[in-house]
Image (spheres, coloured by chain):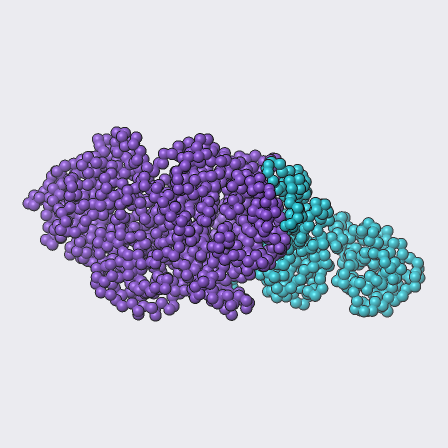
Chain colours: A purple, B cyan
């Protein structure tokens, strides 16, 4: 969560707005609250068995700690260096991190100021804070620090000593928690070599320390494994070698058996060895057993091995890697073995690390592993080890949003309970086949956040044609339901066999395949057919109608059903070109609809498929479930379809005759090739010229001039200044569509209308004749019979914006200047009825200007020329209702604009007076800006990485952020200067780091008294920014 | 005002008597009276005019009508200036200019409006001077030597002039800066310039400081920017329509300029500081200082109160404030809104299929392929491309000439009216 500095653009405010804004004041802030999804590029994993917390480190230097769903902490290192290792100090709420730059950091959960959430005061606000750091000094006299580069860390169970294994083979000891080096204890390799037999020593170095493991029963004894294969049992108190194990194979990892009688080593050649530790035997030449599980052909290394004992029988052996090099060397595998049972988990991305959740009490005789947690590069997989067959457990958080690349998103707030329930059931039916119902093993901490007041859905469209429904009500984004649209079409791969549950496929099991692979996880970056990609989604939460539109011009209307059904999907083709001549589509073909009935599982089932021709990607879609109408637009035009009567009502071509690019489709590169050729020639020419210039000017002129010349040399970027013209390419792209019940014909009769805006600043308004809708119309034609009457559309107005900028959004405002409610809301009394007595107006937001026109006579009322003022372009626009913090039932609608510079501008409507501006997303983060989606109550989401949504809130009232407690067994340190001036950590650096000022925070801190050991301590990892309040008064 | 038309008895053209009079008068009137010789068709009239007397173009026009006894005849006035060029008199400004430049004689040529309009051109008189015997016009320093062999530049009628650029706010800007207004309306020329990043050197009390700046990097040949001569390569851009560009990126400045492209006001620091307007003192340089290439189209600072000749057709307020407000309202109405007549008010007869087809053909849209379809879909008609382009061309004119609604091309209006649609501008 970051605080943002709020810049005020308090313009001259007239009296009428003052009285409103006074209530409105204090309710608008910008805070980035939580990150949803899977951390981008994870690099380290750790688990605290006492607190039941899991930590994940990333390549960008972030540490994220997770416990029970809703419990999250985030820490961010000062440098964006990769975190290579994390180790918990069990039970203390502390952790150590090792960074790629060889420094070790100690982190603590510290108490912060209490804060008020939802009217309830939660005190003890805590965040994950960096306490101290240490970096190992290089050996005196040796320049290169590679010798003291840390390879492994071992934290003793007593938590007072940290053992550091290094590349040079030395082991260093640090006292905790102060991180001071115990010089006297340092164990260099020479000391070990002395006690080695001569024939083993053979003059070579032992190599880096590969593994350090503490004896499970006898504290003070550690096992040191060197890369060359030697394993030493070292007694810390006596500083003596207790036993030597002369391994011959290059060592990868070590693990103790629980009793301490034996340990297992894994090796570079894909094998593992079991060694017994018997007293008195100081030098072991041979392991008890040595196995290469996937031999005999050369295998890859086993990177990590775990050996867990069970009460029922033989131990469980878990190891990553070890695959036969030639045949499966490229697979990312982890093997679970117990007796005869053997499963090779086959992942789609690299295994970063893994651990088991097992019993840690000393008195217990067996490990009894209950779960295996595997951190992969792209997802987290948890395997239930207690249930036969080792099924995988669904993760309640860290969902891989990007299992297939996200192509669009859509948010629905306050989902009706009934729809919610049906979705949950549909989702359960889907999961039932895949997952057993084990309990989530990582359950540390306690979620203190109040239960969400309303259910929120986030829908993501993916490249593979799926739409995923996420529960976005709380901190953890949990998958609810997955909808596939591929089975509507006839594709190369049969959509029936779900690639994600081969475990249930009997064929695969029976086949005597070796290794016994089992595909696990859902990250699947490869799309079968890019045309399946979802471009636009719209859902009506009252009628449960869903419209999904894709890359190949397919628009699918779906309805929710609780029963499985086999049916044909109606196909309707709409030609948006309308026989316009001179154009040929050179892009991709349309998707072939399935010819035979397809089985559709419970959930959303397709009703109609509308295929646009040419099959260009759908760029806009609108749904009005009350009128049974959908509208869709592509780069060629837009259409209106009545899905109840299954007929196309309207097709309108928006192409400009000169626009060839749109016609030829994305595959035509003629224009761009010409352009790029021209550019490259220009570059060559320029570089020649500048080269000459440099030789002349630089030596002769002064430094300032030289710098200037240099500046000019670096390929001066030029920008052409030219007004947009009508025949710019892609000018006909339909950018937005909207249905509204408003006044288009005259000022006294309102009726259904359709609005469409294009890339070249054209707006088309159609008056619709919908049978049964409109004042008194139904009675008039009562005799005609419902079925024979069809929807009609008549062009009412055409507006060509002078500046020809793309129209980003169109919205009709009622007589009070409020946006019209959604379909059904007015007719079913779910929202305040729109004011139909006063004149309506239409808000048209282009990339350059915001403008409100009066209706029915379209004349400009108010406007704001954003680009002319700020030089930024509008990317996303939303009308957001901000509820007042002071007054429960009062809310005001505000226009929120996200620009191409990543900042948010807020305007009041319909006056379009600028209210406030925030920096939000880095302007370089184009995909972040493009992915931004707003909720109706002032929150929003944008992608900070392919796999993570950042959630932000513009409203002080509606904030979703983690609020949780953890029971620690240490006294909680007073917060060292935990005020707003400390930067709140953010895992990914995509947003601007501008700190808000935090006055008024200090007065809170005194209310928090330091608590004693073993008290339940509510710790919260985030605290709300103290803010500049928006105060618009005179 | 007194236009003291010293009544010259109706003398026959070219009579000896008047010539003698003319020879006599200069001594008497040289200081405050201008001798006027006006010609209408084949008739000459001579009279005197007070040089510094108040009065303007209207009065003078009426006076000439009286003198020539042609009341009610619409005429155009022209005068021969010191260089022998035939220049128009159609407002107070150029009337005063004509009076002040008369040395000693002011020659007025009157033509009927219905006639073939005179072509005002440089050297137009000189080429004919022998035939007309206008020796008196040949003054020293007219530079006729160098222009003898050159064809004169053709100058269109004043009402045909369209302002394409102006230098504004000279009085409030530092001399090193220039604020240029480019009018894109109605031209088919591209704006025609490119901008780039660069480093600007500023002199501060702390010494020379280098800050990033935005510069003009290229002018397109034949473009509007080049043709004005007011902008040059390497000119630093300081403001765009009154908004400081300091701290803005190249892309931001680009977007701002494009957003304002129909009425772009850029404040530049010219790389070439030699042509700067000296805005106090020398009035003589007025109007000529920076207006190379845009004949008579500059309204430079000293003439604030009186509009420049060319601004008659498209009056601009050369005010100090280039605040958005002024130009904004003009722009707004630039949004072209086409209303469909066929869209009957609510209770009127339902639009039938045939009606719809009508609508399609008579679509108010400039787009050729505007159709409203009642099923079956492919029924809709579409206009041939050629018509479509015509229509869209005419509409472009409409949208472009927003500042000057009277200019709405009649052809397009007609065609629109034929279609039975209303255009609101």
Which of the pair B43/A65 is nearer the observer?
A65
A961 relative position to A843: left or right: left
Give me the residue at 17% from left, 46% from top: A367
B26 relative position to A733: left or right: right
A319 relative position to A777: left or right: left
Which of the pair B313/A937 is nearer the observer?
A937
Which of the pair B266/B413 is nearer the observer?
B413
**Residue A447 to residue A1004: above or below:** above
Indicate the position of residue A406 as horizontal and vertical percent values. Answer: 41, 44
Indicate the position of residue A996 as horizontal and vertical percent values. Answer: 40, 63
Give me the residue at 36% from left, 62% from top: A117
**Residue A576 to residue A69: above or below:** above
Which of the pair A638/A421 is nearer the observer?
A421
Q: Quadrant of residue A378?
A: top left
Indicate the position of residue A326 as horizontal and vertical percent values. Answer: 28, 32
Give me the residue at 21% from left, 54% from top: A50
Q: Quadrant of residue A161?
A: bottom left
């Amino acid at each position: 969560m970051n605080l943002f500095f709020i810049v005020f653009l308090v313009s001259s405010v007239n009296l009428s707005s003052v009285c409103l804004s006074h209530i409105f004041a204090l309710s608008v802030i910008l805070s980035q609250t939580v990150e949803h999804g899977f951390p981008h590029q994870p690099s380290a994993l750790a688990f605290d068995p006492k607190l039941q917390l899991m930590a994940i480190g990333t390549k960008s230097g972030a540490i994220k700690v997770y416990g029970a769903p809703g419990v999250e902490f985030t820490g961010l290192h000062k440098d964006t260096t990769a975190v290579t290792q994390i180790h918990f100090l069990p039970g203390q709420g502390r952790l150590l991190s090792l960074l790629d730059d060889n420094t070790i950091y100690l982190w603590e959960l510290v108490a912060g100021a209490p804060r008020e959430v939802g009217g309830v005061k939660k005190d003890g606000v805590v965040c994950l804070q960096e306490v101290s750091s240490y970096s190992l000094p290089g050996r005196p006299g040796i320049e290169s620090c590679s010798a003291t580069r840390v390879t492994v860390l071992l934290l003793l169970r007593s938590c007072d000593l940290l053992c550091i294994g290094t590349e040079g083979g030395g082991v260093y000891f640090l006292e905790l928690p102060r991180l001071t080096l115990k010089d006297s204890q340092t164990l260099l390799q020479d000391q070990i070599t002395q006690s080695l037999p001569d024939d083993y020593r053979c003059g070579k170095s032992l190599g880096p320390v590969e593994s350090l493991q503490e004896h499970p029963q006898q504290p003070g004894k550690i096992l040191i494994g060197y890369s060359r294969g030697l394993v030493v049992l070292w007694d810390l108190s006596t500083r003596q070698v207790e036993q030597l194990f002369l391994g011959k194979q290059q060592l990868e990892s070590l693990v103790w058996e629980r009793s301490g009688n034996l340990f297992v080593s894994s090796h570079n050649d894909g094998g593992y060895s079991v060694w017994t530790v018997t007293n008195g035997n100081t030098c072991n030449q041979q392991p008890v057993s040595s196995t290469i599980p996937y031999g005999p052909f050369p295998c890859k290394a086993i990177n990590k091995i775990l050996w867990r004992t069970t009460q029922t029988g033989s131990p469980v052996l878990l190891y990553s890697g070890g695959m036969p090099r030639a045949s499966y060397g490229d697979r990312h595998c982890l093997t679970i073995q117990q007796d005869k049972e053997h499963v090779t988990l086959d992942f789609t991305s690299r295994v970063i690390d893994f651990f088991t959740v097992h019993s840690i009490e000393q008195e217990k005789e067996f490990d009894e592993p209950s779960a295996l947690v595997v951190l992969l590069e792209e997802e987290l997989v948890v395997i239930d080890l207690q249930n036969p067959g080792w099924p995988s457990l669904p993760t309640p958080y860290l969902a891989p949003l990007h299992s297939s690349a996200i192509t669009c998103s859509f948010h629905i707030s306050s989902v009706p309970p009934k729809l919610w329930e049906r979705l949950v059931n549909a989702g359960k039916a889907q999961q039932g086949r895949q997952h057993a119902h084990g309990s989530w093993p990582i359950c540390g901490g306690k979620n203190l956040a109040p239960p969400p007041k309303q259910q929120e859905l986030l829908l993501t469209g993916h490249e593979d044609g799926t739409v995923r429904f996420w529960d976005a009500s709380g901190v953890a984004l949990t998958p609810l339901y997955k909808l596939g649209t591929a089975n509507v079409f006839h594709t190369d791969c049969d959509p029936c066999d779900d690639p994600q549950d081969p475990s249930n496929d009997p064929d695969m099991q029976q086949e005597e395949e070796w290794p016994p692979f089992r595909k696990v996880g859902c990250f699947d970056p490869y799309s079968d057919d890019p045309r399946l990609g979802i471009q636009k989604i719209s859902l009506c939460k009252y009628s449960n109608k869903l419209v999904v539109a894709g890359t190949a011009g397919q628009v699918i209307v779906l309805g929710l059903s609780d029963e499985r059904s086999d049916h044909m999907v109606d196909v309707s083709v709409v030609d948006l070109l309308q026989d316009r001549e001179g154009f040929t589509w050179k892009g991709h073909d349309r998707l072939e609809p399935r010819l035979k009935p397809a089985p559709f599982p419970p959930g959303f089932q397709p009703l109609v498929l509308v295929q646009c021709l040419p099959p260009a990607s759908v760029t806009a879609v609108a749904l009005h479930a009350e009128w049974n109408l959908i509208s869709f637009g592509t780069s060629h035009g837009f259409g209106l379809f009545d899905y109840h009567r299954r007929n196309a009502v309207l097709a309108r071509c928006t192409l400009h005759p000169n626009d060839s690019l749109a016609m030829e489709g994305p595959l035509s590169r003629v224009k761009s090739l010409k352009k790029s050729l021209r550019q490259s020639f220009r570059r060559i020419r320029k570089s020649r010229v500048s080269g000459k210039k440099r030789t002349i000017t630089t030596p002769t002129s002064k430094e300032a001039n030289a710098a200037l010349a240099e500046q000019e040399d670096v390929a001066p970027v030029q920008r052409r200044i030219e007004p947009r013209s009508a025949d710019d390419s892609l000018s006909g792209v339909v950018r937005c569509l909207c249905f509204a019940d408003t006044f288009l014909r005259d000022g006294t009769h309102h009726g259904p209308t359709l609005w469409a805006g294009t890339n070249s600043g054209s707006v088309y308004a159609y008056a619709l004749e919908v049978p049964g809708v409109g004042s008194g119309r139904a009675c008039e034609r009562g005799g005609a019979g419902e079925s024979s009457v069809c929807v009609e559309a008549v062009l009412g107005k055409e507006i060509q914006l002078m500046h020809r900028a793309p129209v980003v959004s169109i919205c009709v405002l009622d007589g009070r200047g409020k946006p019209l409610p959604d379909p059904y809301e007015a007719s079913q009394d779910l929202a305040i009825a729109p004011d139909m007595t006063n004149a309506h107006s239409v808000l048209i937001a282009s990339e350059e200007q915001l403008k409100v026109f009066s209706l029915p006579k379209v004349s400009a009322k108010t406007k704001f020329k954003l680009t002319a003022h700020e030089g930024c372009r509008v990317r996303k626009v939303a009308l957001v209702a901000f509820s007042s913090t002071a007054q429960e039932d009062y809310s005001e609608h505000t226009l929120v604009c996200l620009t191409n510079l990543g900042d948010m501008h807020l305007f009041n409507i319909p006056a379009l007076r600028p209210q406030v501006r925030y920096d939000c997303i880095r302007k370089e983060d184009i995909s972040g800006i493009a992915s931004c989606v707003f909720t109706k109550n002032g929150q929003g989401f944008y992608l900070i990485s392919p796999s993570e949504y950042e959630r932000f809130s513009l409203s002080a009232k509606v904030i979703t952020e983690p609020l949780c407690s953890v029971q620690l067994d240490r006294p909680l340190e007073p917060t060292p200067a935990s005020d707003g001036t400390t930067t709140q950590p953010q895992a990914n650096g995509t947003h601007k780091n501008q700190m808000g000022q935090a006055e008024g925070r200090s007065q809170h801190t005194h209310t928090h008294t330091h608590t004693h050991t073993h008290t339940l301590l509510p710790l919260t990892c985030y605290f709300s920014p103290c803010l500049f309040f928006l105060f618009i008064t005179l | 005002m007194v236009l003291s038309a010293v009544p010259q008895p109706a003398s026959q053209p070219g009579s000896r008597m008047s010539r003698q009079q003319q020879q006599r008068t200069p001594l008497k009137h040289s200081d405050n009276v201008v001798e006027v010789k006006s010609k209408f068709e084949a008739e000459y009239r001579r009279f005197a005019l007070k040089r510094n007397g108040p009065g303007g173009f209207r009065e003078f026009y009426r006076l000439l009508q009286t003198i020539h006894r042609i009341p009610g005849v619409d005429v155009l006035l022209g005068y021969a200036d010191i260089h022998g060029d035939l220049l128009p008199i159609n407002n107070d400004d150029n009337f005063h200019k004509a009076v002040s430049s008369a040395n000693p004689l002011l020659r007025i040529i009157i033509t009927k409006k219905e006639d073939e309009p005179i072509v005002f051109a440089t050297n137009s008189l000189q080429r004919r001077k022998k035939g007309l015997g206008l020796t008196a016009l040949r003054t020293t320093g007219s530079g006729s030597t160098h222009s003898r062999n050159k064809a004169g530049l053709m100058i269109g009628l004043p009402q045909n002039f369209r302002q394409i650029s102006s230098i504004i706010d000279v009085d409030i800007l530092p001399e090193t800066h220039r604020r240029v207004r480019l009018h894109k309306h109605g031209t088919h020329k591209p704006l025609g310039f490119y901008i780039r990043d660069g480093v600007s050197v500023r002199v501060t009390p702390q010494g020379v400081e280098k800050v990033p700046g935005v510069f003009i990097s290229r002018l397109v040949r034949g473009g509007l920017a080049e043709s004005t001569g007011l902008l040059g390569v390497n000119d630093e851009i300081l403001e765009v329509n009154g908004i400081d560009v300091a701290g803005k990126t190249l892309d931001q400045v680009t977007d701002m300029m494009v957003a304002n492209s129909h009425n772009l006001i850029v404040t530049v620091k010219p790389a070439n500081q030699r042509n700067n307007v000296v805005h106090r003192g020398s009035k003589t340089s007025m109007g000529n200082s920076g207006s190379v290439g845009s004949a008579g189209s500059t309204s430079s600072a000293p003439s604030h109160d009186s509009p420049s000749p060319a601004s008659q057709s498209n009056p601009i307020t050369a005010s100090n404030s280039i605040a958005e407000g002024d130009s904004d309202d003009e722009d707004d109405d630039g949004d072209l809104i086409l209303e469909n007549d066929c869209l009957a008010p609510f209770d009127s007869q339902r639009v039938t299929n045939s009606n719809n087809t009508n609508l399609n053909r008579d679509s108010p849209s400039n787009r050729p392929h505007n159709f409203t379809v009642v099923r079956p879909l492919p029924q809709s008609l579409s206009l041939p491309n050629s018509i479509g382009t015509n229509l869209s061309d005419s509409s472009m004119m409409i949208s472009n000439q927003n500042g000057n609604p009277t200019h709405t091309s009649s052809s397009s209006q007609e065609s629109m009216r034929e279609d039975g649609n209303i255009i609101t501008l």
